[in-house]
């Protein structure tokens, strides 16, 4: 009633006896609370409020309460708490349970045997010898085998080599030994997967053979067809009839100018350059960051194709009208009735050259490695 009458929540919290040391003399304010730190009835009441509101009286196992909510903090982004979460997981002993369980399974599968006396003698020796010099290693090399599994021997020297790679492990040698055994078992299990799990073995073989086939095919067919320009050109000349065009094609550049007054100058410069140099030279000469005075389109186009600008400017067909920023056009190049080189039909020529190389490669393999088919067995399969 007093709160409803307007009395300050903080004043009342300080005025009433409270045995909770976290809130005495602090206007009843708790430090920042996380979910799960208080009874569920308390949390339900708090999270049902809006900032600045106080609750109706409610009861928990600790007694009766009236609470006021001051603020809530949203969940932070995962990037902000990633390190904290990782540290919590590292400290939590439960994270070790799956590893221990799997290690125990592998120990049974591979008949793990441990010489407890030899292990304790090794740990005592390592604890006493902080610096492992040549003399120490000679002593360790004479130790009996500490443990074994499926024809694998875990020796004192191997354990020391493990410690040298994991400096932090030296702080707890018993745990370090458990980690060493686990790592050794996992490594051995990994080497046995193909034989232990036949389906996985077949999958790995398929993947291995597929990667080999890809690399060999790339070297003998795909990459060779793209890089062997002399071979491609030779193939094109020998099979010209396969690459004939139904319509003439223009090969060159089409240049658009912003101002009519510059056409003559730009055209003169363009005609003095090799085809491949026209675009970079014109753009570098007449364009800058603030103004674009020319546009250059380079390629090979056929008459009546999908480029209306080329149809009009080069072949004088169609109803395209220049407008916009580049209304004045001219072209540099030639109209070809048929392709003159593989470069004129590079995509199609490369694809057919790949097929040719693959057929030649397979024929060569068949000659080197004859395939004999047992037709009697084939009949049985039918």
Image (spheres, grey):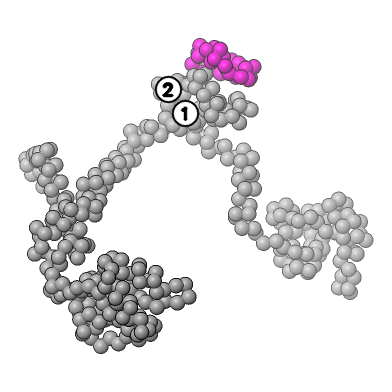
Residue 133 position, x and y percent, is 57, 16
Q: Residue at x 39, y 69 (%)?
A: 284
Q: Residue at x 16, y 62 (%)?
A: 341
**The quadrant where residue 344 appears:** bottom left
Helix, strand or loop: magenta stretch: helix
Residue 210 position, x and y percent, is 27, 45
Q: Number of callouts in the render?
A: 2
For marks 1 and 2, give the CA distance: 9 Å
Q: Nearer the viewer, residue 191 or 329?
A: 329
In the rendered image, the vertical position of residue 61 relative to residue 189, given as above or below: below
**Circles 1 and 2 in contact, beta carbons < 8 Å:** yes
Q: Nearer the viewer, residue 369 or 273?
A: 273
Which residue in the structure is indicated by mark 2? Answer: 152
Any part of residue 288 in sight: yes
In the rendered image, the vertical position of residue 128 relative to residue 13, given as above or below: above
Q: Residue at x 33, y 78 (%)?
A: 265
| For residue 341, side relative to residue 327 (left or right) | left
In the rendered image, the vertical position of residue 85 relative to residue 109, given as above or below: below
Answer with mark 1 or mark 2, whichever residue precedes in sequence: 2
Residues drawn in magenta = 118-146
Any part of residue 307 in sight: no
Which residue in the structure is indicated by mark 1? Answer: 184
Residue 233 position, x and y percent, is 16, 57
């Amino acid at each position: 009633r007093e709160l409803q009458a307007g009395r300050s929540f903080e004043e009342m919290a300080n005025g009433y006896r409270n045995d909770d040391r976290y809130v005495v003399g602090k206007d009843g304010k708790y430090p920042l609370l996380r979910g799960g730190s208080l009874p569920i009835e308390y949390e339900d009441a708090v999270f049902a409020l809006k900032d600045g509101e106080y609750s109706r009286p409610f009861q928990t196992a600790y007694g009766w309460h009236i609470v006021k909510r001051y603020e809530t903090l949203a969940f932070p982004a995962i990037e902000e708490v990633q390190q904290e979460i990782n540290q919590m997981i590292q400290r939590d002993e439960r994270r070790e349970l799956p590893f221990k369980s799997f290690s125990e399974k592998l120990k049974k599968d591979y008949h793990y045997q441990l010489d407890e006396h030899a292990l304790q003698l090794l740990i005592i020796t390592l604890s006493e010898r902080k610096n492992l010099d040549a003399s120490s290693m000679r002593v360790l090399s004479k130790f009996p085998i500490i443990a074994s599994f499926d024809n694998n021997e875990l020796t004192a020297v191997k354990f020391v080599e493990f410690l040298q790679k994991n400096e932090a492990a030296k702080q707890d040698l018993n745990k370090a030994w458990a980690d060493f055994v686990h790592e050794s078992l996992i490594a051995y299990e990994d080497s046995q997967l193909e034989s232990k799990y036949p389906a996985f073995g077949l999958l790995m073989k398929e993947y291995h053979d597929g990667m080999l086939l890809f690399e060999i095919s790339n070297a003998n067919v795909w990459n060779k067809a793209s890089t062997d320009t002399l071979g491609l050109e030779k193939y094109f000349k020998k099979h010209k009839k396969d690459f004939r065009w139904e319509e003439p094609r223009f090969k060159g550049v089409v240049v658009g100018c912003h101002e009519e007054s510059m056409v003559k100058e730009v055209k003169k410069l363009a005609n003095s350059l090799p085809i491949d140099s026209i675009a970079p030279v014109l753009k570098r000469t007449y364009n800058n960051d603030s103004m674009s005075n020319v546009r250059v389109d380079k390629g090979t186009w056929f008459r009546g194709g999908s480029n209306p600008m080329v149809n009009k400017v080069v072949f004088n067909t169609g109803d395209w009208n220049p407008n916009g920023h580049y209304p004045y056009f001219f072209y540099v190049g030639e109209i070809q009735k048929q392709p003159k080189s593989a470069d004129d039909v590079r995509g199609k020529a490369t694809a057919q050259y790949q097929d040719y190389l693959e057929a030649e490669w397979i024929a060569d393999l068949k000659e080197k490695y004859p395939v004999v088919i047992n037709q009697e067995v084939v009949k049985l399969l039918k």
